Image: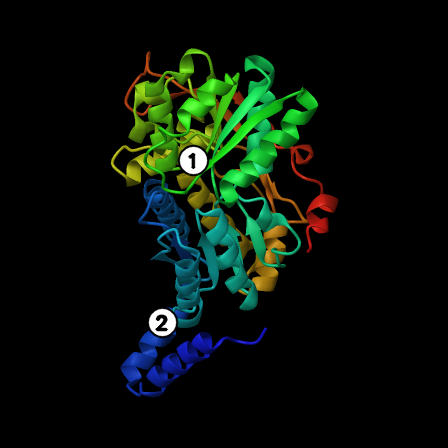
Amino acid sequence: MTQSTPNRRRRQILGAGLAAVSSPFVLNVARAESSTIKIGFPTPLTGPYSIEAQDQQRAAALAVNEFNETGGFNGRKAELLVRDTKLNSGEAVSRTLELIEKDKVNFVVGSLSAAAQLSINAVCRQHNIIFNSISQSDAINDAKNRGPYTFHEALNPHMTAGAVARYAFPKFGKRIAYLTADYAYGHEMVAGFEAAGGPLGAKTVADIRHPLGTADYSSFLPRIQALKPDILVLCNFGTDLVNSAKQATDFGLKAHTKIITPVLLYAARLAGGADAFDGILGGTSYYWGMEDTVPAAKSFNDKFRKAYGGAVPSGYGAYGYAGVRSILAAVRNAKSVESAPVAKALERLHYNWYKGDQFYRECDHQSVQSVIIIESKSKNMKDKYDVFNVLEIGKPDEKYLRTCAQVSAKSA
C-alpha cells in the first residue's frame, strides 16, 4: 500500500530525530527499550465510553503485571502503552500510527468502538502487526476487513444479540421496538436480534435511531409508547444506555413493555442506579458474580480486588485482561515476538483466563465463548457490587456464530 504524505512526513521527522542522537547513553537506552515487549493499547479514555475504557486499562495492566511477575519471556518484560482515541476514528488512526511508528510496539490490543476498531485494524494490517480487538463488531470478522493478524477477543453482535433474543423473545413477546444508536454498534445489534428473532416469529414494529451522545430521549419515547411493543430493545452503549434507561423508566414504559439491551454492563448499572435499571435484562461477556460457580472468575476477581482496592472488574474490563493475556501467552508458546509465529500460536490457543473455555476460530479469528444473560436488580443485594442476577450462562459453540462461508462472503 502506498504511504500517505502525512505518514512519510511522520517517518521523516522520526528519522531526523534519530539521526541527531549520537550519545552512547541514549543508544543504550534505546537497546534496553527494544528488549521490552510493547503492547499498544488505544482506547477511548475520554468521552461517553470512558468508564468502560478505564476499566479495560486497569485489567490490561493486570495481565501485563502477571506476565512480568512470572518471568516474562526470556527475561524480557512486557509494557502497556495506553493512548486515548477520544472515541474518534481519525484520532484512533493517529494514535495507532504513533504507537507503531514512534513507540515501535510489537502488538496492539484495544478499541472499544465498532468504527474505531476497523480504523485501528487497517493501520495494523498495513504494518503487519497483530491487532486483538476488544470491542464488539461483526464487520471485523468479515473477509474485506480482517487480515492474517486480525483477532477478535470480544463477543460480536451476532453472538450477543442472538443469545439475548433467544432468551427474551419467547418469554416476553414478539412485537419488538428498537431504540438504536445510529452507528455500527447499533446497526449490527439490530441485525443480530432480527436474525435470531425471525425463526422465533418476532416482528420489528420500529427501529428508531438516535445520534451517538444523545442526552434527551423525550422526542423518541412517546413514539415508542404509542406502538405498544412487547419489548423495547435499547441498542446503545455507555452514557447513551444510561440516559435512555433512566428516561424510559421515568416515562413509565416498564408498565407494559419489557426493556432489554444486548450489552448490559456493570459500569452502566452503577452509573444509572438501581431504580433506572431495575428489571432490565441483557447480555454480557462477563459478570463478577459468576465467581460462585466458575473457578476462573473467582481467581480473576481476587487478583483484580487485590490490585484495585477491593473493586471488581466489569465485563469490558475483562476483555482488556483476556486480550492482552492471550497475546502474551502466545508469545511464550511461539517463543517469539514476531507477528507470524505469534499469530499461529494464537490460532492454536485454548484458554480459560476468567470465564470458562475459549478459543479463536481459525477462519476468522473470532473468540468462541459463552454469552451470559443477566437481569438488573434493586433488592436483596449483598453489597454495592451485587447488581445483577445471572439468569443463564451459555456454552461456547460455533453454531451461534455466522458460518465461515458467510464471513468469507463479506468481501466487497
Depth check, front residue: 110 or 36: 110
Residue type at mark 2 is Ala
Image quadrant holding the N terminus, namely: bottom right
Q: Residue at 40% across / 43% down in the picture?
A: 212
Q: Residue at 47% across / 16% down in the picture?
A: 257
**Where is residue 224 drawn, in percent x and y?**
46, 23
Provide the residue designation for mark 1.
315
Residue 390 visible at all: no
Residue type at mark 1 is Gly
The quadrant holding residue 244 is top left
Provide the residue designation for mark 2.
32
How packed is label 2: few (under 14 Cα within 10 Å), some, or many (20 or more)?
Answer: few
Image quadrant holding the C terminus, namely: bottom right
**Where is residue 247 drawn, in percent x and y?**
34, 25
Give the residue at the far right of this rendering. 405
Measured in 3D between alpha carbons, the distance from the residue under mark 2 to the one under mark 1, in whole angstroms, is 35 Å
